[in-house]
Amino acid sequence: MNPVDQVFMALCIWREARGEQFRAKAGVAWTIMNRVKKGGWWGNDILSVITHPWQFSSMTAHDDPNLAHWPRSMEPAWQESLQVAKEVLTCQLEDPTSGAVYYHDSSLSGPPVQWGSVELKATIGRLLFYV
């Protein structure tokens, strides 16, 4: 397991889902992995997928307040995000999203139109996951 991949994946999980349950954090991690597996315009490795413009707003969108937030080393949500990343990267945790490559928070009325036709695969906490 590449420690850089673990830290960047954990940072993305923490920024996107720090208030969510473990399983929802795993959903974010698996969305990253599913995009890596699918390849294409998202990128072909963890870092390129996470940092692809406008894909994970907390990592690239200038107007997202999470872009400037950093975890504290012993913060429970950060420790859990690191654990989720490790378990996903070492194949110890199954995909709770059934292959999702998209997700959004339940505060949105539905998936963005830019995604085209998508199928809801899982709802975990406040996150809805799609293929």
Image (tube, rainbow, N blue to C red):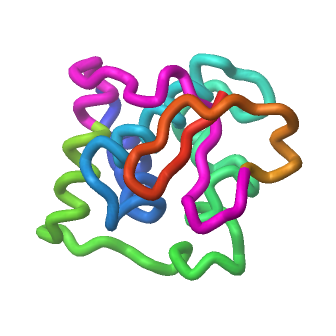
Picture layout, residue 126 above or below residue 89: below
The location of residue 1, given as percent across then percent down, is 29, 26
The location of residue 99, given as percent across then percent down, is 54, 22
What is the quadrant of the C terminus in the image? top right
Between residues 113 and 32, which one lies in front from this camera angle?
113
Magenta range: 86-110
| Residue occupying image coordinates x 40% and y 53% | 13
Q: Is residue 91 magenta?
A: yes
| Residue occupying image coordinates x 45% and y 57% | 126
The location of residue 55, given as percent across then percent down, is 69, 50
Q: Report whether 21 appears left or right of 64.
A: left
Picture layout, residue 84 above or below residue 77: above
Q: Report whether 70 appears left or right of 63.
A: left
Between residues 49 and 112, which one lies in front from this camera angle?
112
How many numbered circles does the render carry? 0
Quarter location, residue 93:
top left
Between residues 12 and 5, which one lies in front from this camera angle?
12
> Chief secondary structure of the magenta span?
loop
